[in-house]
Image (cartoon, coloured by chain):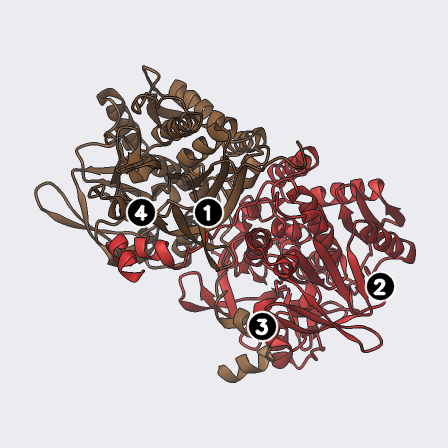
Chain colours: A brown, B red
Amino acid sequence: MSQHGLMVARPRVVVVGGGFGGLAAVRRLARAPVDVTLIDRTNHHLFQPLLYQVATGLLSPGEIAPPLRVITHRQANAAVHMAEVTGIDPDRRRVHLRGADGTSGDLGYDHLIVAAGARDSYFGHRDWARHLHPMKTLAQAVDLRDKLLAAYERAADTDDRSERDRWTTFVIIGGGPTGVEVAGQLVSMARQFQRDFHRLATGRARIVIVEAGDSLLAAFSAPLRAHAQRKLSSLGVEIRVGTKAVRVDGRGVDVEGGGGARERVAAGTVVWAAGVKASPLAAMLGDATGASVDHRGRVQVAPDCSLPGHPEVFAIGDMADADNLPGLAEPAMQEGWYVAKHIHRQITGRSAPGRFRYRDLGTMATISPVDAVADAFGLRLSGVPAKVAWAAVHLAFLTGWGKRGGVLARWAYELGTSNRSERVILEGVGSEDGLNRLAHSDEPAAETLMAGR
Amino acid sequence: MSQHGLMVARPRVVVVGGGFGGLAAVRRLARAPVDVTLIDRTNHHLFQPLLYQVATGLLSPGEIAPPLRVITHRQANAAVHMAEVTGIDPDRRRVHLRGADGTSGDLGYDHLIVAAGARDSYFGHRDWARHLHPMKTLAQAVDLRDKLLAAYERAADTDDRSERDRWTTFVIIGGGPTGVEVAGQLVSMARQFQRDFHRLATGRARIVIVEAGDSLLAAFSAPLRAHAQRKLSSLGVEIRVGTKAVRVDGRGVDVEGGGGARERVAAGTVVWAAGVKASPLAAMLGDATGASVDHRGRVQVAPDCSLPGHPEVFAIGDMADADNLPGLAEPAMQEGWYVAKHIHRQITGRSAPGRFRYRDLGTMATISPVDAVADAFGLRLSGVPAKVAWAAVHLAFLTGWGKRGGVLARWAYELGTSNRSERVILEGVGSEDGLNRLAHSDEPAAETLMAGR
């Protein structure tokens, strides 16, 4: 390069969100003559399909969440920025940011890909939030793990029979793949814990799935739905289909079946696996561009995933409504590749690609350590073959051989020892008050305690 | 056993604390005709010597913290109870508890072993607490990990040179084994992160150890102290011996050297590896039995580790002053075995054992992935041989082959890839407020945001 050469700035592509869609776009843009800035509120890509295994103590957070910087460090044209996007201004082509250091700033772009995903939504029941355990972020999964493990400790701690039953009752709202997979893990957990909780009949833990629709795993074919339902029932899971949660409080759930009959299920832990809502950035984009926003908060995009009047702005993944695709990793990744290619062609002066077409590779869900269902690659599998296919696909899509080896080792450990590796409750009893607080305050703790008695 | 046989209650031994001392006692009591109740505020045994590797993202919490229930589940005469001991009444032979479910209760004992350990102490500087990162619990280690990883993100986020330097400056107060081991890890971390933070010269991260004494690793022999000091210096660690921290605030540390000269070290993260103080239960025991309590809060015990006038009550480990032994795992374990044997002999009518005698097996500390110092088993080792000895001893003392395999795999992964496995910052930008809070509250988020602009 000549020292006197004119520096021509390459087009800047800003990608908001390091999930499956955003990351696919960033990687595909490695070949394009652009500078890519990937912005995420966290420092990691989250492998959502295994998040429930963190929540149930099988995997550690790091094993399913490689840092975005590590994933992209060989990509010379990509930079990662840990920040929250607080606004988008399509007319001035700028995003507003709040950085990791709390300061605000602006970032200009030539092309923008918004792939900010979805978060949990309680269908307007905002008062439910503090009694429910959603599973969208790693922090939520770790919190749920603490609560599940603590539920057994609490059950072991009480002599009151009904309280003990309540603490060993786990309700899962939502019978999709997440709900089914969590239920399967809770069954394994209860069986494994029998060795460790002598006073509890943990094998009798009550695990209830509440699903408003007619069946579990609505996205699967009928034989696989039946298989999953039969297997979960035989594992002791109570399946309530056609049933809605109508009230959630600190001591359980009220459910309402088809006939309108209400029933109280006293439960120590209620897992939310039912509804998600698009990132607020979707509505923000709709507002700025005139695109409509559906009841799940998703912004309607053009057939090429762009926003009306803004061929340089794309929304993909769970926050975009493109042909009403399911909120899975696969459509998001395909959209990510597609829009990256689209931008690459725009920049290099080639014709736009045809409209985005989703190639459905199917879906799968695991039931137990040796059972799964898979509607994938044109095959319908259940039992051990489905479980093997499930494990192979999940390991293949994990990022990095280190992670693959680690996860495989943890699975082998569980199969071999009937135990799970991450059974730590981070917060101890009285961590926030009592002795610990006194010790932290550096006061003459004992005197204070004695005086307080 | 006859159905009509008279049930004779076996003596109940209550053990407070599932650290090295308490756990050693519980295991030794497996052979004794007693019922053992192990009480701990957490659900796990914490392998303290590797806690700094959790704090620096090398290991996951579960790998160094097996659940107490799993460790003891084959021991028929042991029960585990997750609770906080809020008081001890030696005259009525009862401990007061607050359980995992928040309720209070009492538990009677025939023999009591109190092994509640130590916690961080800031020598009376209670205002320092919120600016320092101690490393006594898993929750603290995970919090420190988040802060260390976030410091690099913040450094990458700013264009202000002095702020960038501040965020990549790490001060460690305390030059004992923990301080030295943390410093070594921070050097590795900075080197590894160079690949991932293109805009930062992370290799130039500034790592400062502040030690009030004359030398690092005061417990080691002079040649090993010199080796550690030389090696750390060559790795770029700034070593300030004979230097005290005199002020800690949100932006750094003021240190004071031997001549009384003060210097400001602007730092983004300050790790506390200097002082600990015994559990408040030590002072409580002193108050109840008349035993004296030293300036570190430890209760003075008799030569057989019992309390004055209470041959059935023992205090061991970091909270007991027995011949001024160092606060390490080994003395605590030896005391645990000893008092368990003592109780066993009391119960079976045999003569009391002789006074407790510590058999010093030495001490070791790691410096880098290929360097350590070890004053152990009568040998003085440094470099690779010391590192191998260090790894062997630490793996041997870890509980369970699963944990050993997991930790070994993580070490191999770091050596092979120059990366660390657990680089997750659990909390994202704006997790507590902003978009996420709005999304959580189930309000029409976009409208609110637009109105707020």
* Residue B445 at least partly seen: yes
Rate crowding at label 1 as few (under 14), some (14 to 19) or many (20 or more) other CA atoms within 10 Å: few
Label 3 sits on residue: A439
- As drawn, is B318 to the left or to the right of B422? right
| Kind of residue at disc 4 | Asp
Q: Residue furthest left?
A: A259
Give me the C-alpha separation between circle 1 and circle 2. Answer: 67 Å
Closest to the camera, between mark 4 and mark 3, is: 4
Q: In the drawing, does residue B260 fall left or right of residue A171?
A: right
Nearest to N terminus: mark 1 or mark 2: 1
Distance, label 2 to label 3, CA atoms, is 29 Å
- Which chain letter goes with mark 4? A
Q: CA distance from mark 2 to mark 4?
A: 54 Å
Q: Residue under mark 3: which chain is it in?
A: A
Q: Residue furthest top?
A: A378
**Helix or strand or loop: what does disc 2 sit on?**
loop
Q: Secondary structure at mark 1?
A: loop
